Amino acid sequence: MKHPHVVALHPACTPEHVGFIPTFLDLDDPRPAKEQFAERYEYGGWRNQEGFTQGNSRYSLKYPGDPTLKPIAGMTLREELILIYDAGYVAIWQKDGTFEACRMD
């Protein structure tokens, strides 16, 4: 399997923030990230958490009552942008600006 290259987006980003998340994605698998995560992340698969909106900056996440999350690391899978946030959140962003977010800890 070939995994996507991870780029740190915050100076405090450590390998622990990213964990095994890139290993659930295979660049040679034609399926979208959501389907690959659903199959390979055995602690719950991919389950979109409803209620997130984009925060006040591009690619930030906002959940009602919680502070805004900014991405700390990212990778791409073809046309999708996969961003990793504090608290174990991962979001899959599409080119049209839509996204899904899931807790993967």
Image (cartoon, rainbow, N blue to C red):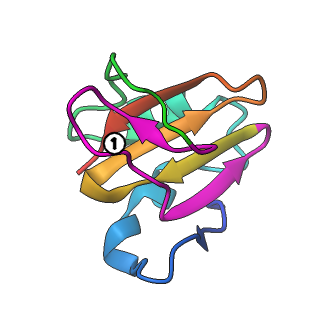
Q: Main secondary structure of the magenta part?
A: loop
The quadrant where residue 5 appears: bottom right
Whether the magenta-drawn stretch holds residue 75 is answered as: yes
Task: Say if 53 sits above or below 42 in the image.
Answer: above
Decide which of 73, 60 is in the foreground and name it: 60
Whether the magenta-drawn stretch holds residue 11 is answered as: no
Decide which of 67, 7 is in the foreground and name it: 67
| Residue at the image position 50 percent from the left and 56 percent from the top | 71
Task: Say if 95 sits above or below 23 in the image.
Answer: above
Picture coordinates of residue 37 (x, y %)? 44, 37
The quadrant where residue 87 appears: bottom left
* Residue 1 seen from this side: no
The quadrant where residue 14 appears: bottom left
Of all residues, the one furthest to the top in this rendering is: 50
Pointer 1 local density, CA inside 10 Å: few below 14, some 14–19, many at least 20:
some
Callout count: 1
Q: Is residue 12 left or right of residue 27?
A: left
Task: Say if 24 sits above or below 62 in the image.
Answer: below
- Secondary structure of the residue carrying tag 1 is loop
Amino acid residing under circle 1: Tyr
| Residue at the image position 54 percent from the left and 50 percent from the top | 83
Residue at image mark 1: 41
Q: Which residues are magenta?
A: 57-79
Q: Is residue 93 left or right of residue 35?
A: right
| Residue at the image position 40 percent from the left and 54 percent from the top | 85
Picture coordinates of residue 13 (x, y %)? 43, 77
Task: Say if 99 sits above or below 88 in the image.
Answer: above
Q: Quadrant of the N terminus?
A: bottom right
* Residue 61 seen from this side: yes
Picture coordinates of residue 62 (x, y %)? 38, 34
